[in-house]
Image (spheres, rainbow, N blue to C red):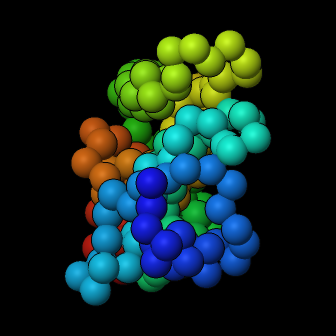
Amino acid sequence: MPSAADREAVEALLGRPVQGDFEVVVRHDDGSPVVLCNAPLLDDGTPMPTRYWLVGEPERTLVSRLEADGGVRAAEAEIDPEVLADAHRRYAAERDAALPLTHAGHRPSGGVGGTRLGVKCLHAHYAWHLAGGDDPVGRWVAERIAEA
């Protein structure tokens, strides 16, 4: 469970109340949240496909700029589709392993960003990469941000 301070900081970054459990797994040097690890289900039982969520600034803005400059298409063109598909499978397996054993309702689907194929959201890939995930798109994003 997040601390009251983490919950408040995340809600300020999101601009709305959080809707499920999370843990801050990457922080800035000042302790502010950068990446969340979300529970696979929201408080109301809705599936949450995004296991790792980039909330920190300036990271979120830098990735948004990369996306606006055609980063999703560029990453898809440069990353081997089989390597990407494997990353989606590993991400989904990690998220699905966090589901309660007794859960019988709807389940999250897809891999990174809720998709099984290609690239949907550079933010989600970069978040997983920052949290220590072996994500080829996240590495690609990190390289582009370092060049900026």
Q: Residue at x 74, y 36 (%)?
A: 46
Q: Is residue 70 above or below residue 92?
A: below
- Horizontal and vertical percent position of residue 136: 34, 42
Q: Is residue 70 above or below residue 28?
A: above
Q: Residue at x 45, y 28 (%)?
A: 98
> Can residue 118 be seen in this snapshot?
no
> Can residue 125 be seen in this snapshot?
yes
Toward which corner of the image does residue 30 lie, by quadrant? bottom left
Image quarter where the C terminus lies is bottom left
- Horizontal and vertical percent position of residue 142: 32, 62
- Is 65 on the left-hand or right-hand side of 129? right
Q: Nearer the viewer, residue 108 or 43?
A: 43
Q: Residue at x 36, y 66 (%)?
A: 144
Q: Is residue 113 above or below residue 101?
A: below
Count of marks, rendered view: 0
Q: Residue at x 31, y 52 (%)?
A: 131
Q: Residue furthest bottom?
A: 30
- Horizontal and vertical percent position of residue 36: 45, 57
Q: Nearer the viewer, residue 6 or 95?
A: 6
- Horizontal and vertical percent position of residue 22: 49, 53
Image quarter where the N terminus lies is bottom left
Q: Nearer the viewer, residue 94 or 105?
A: 105
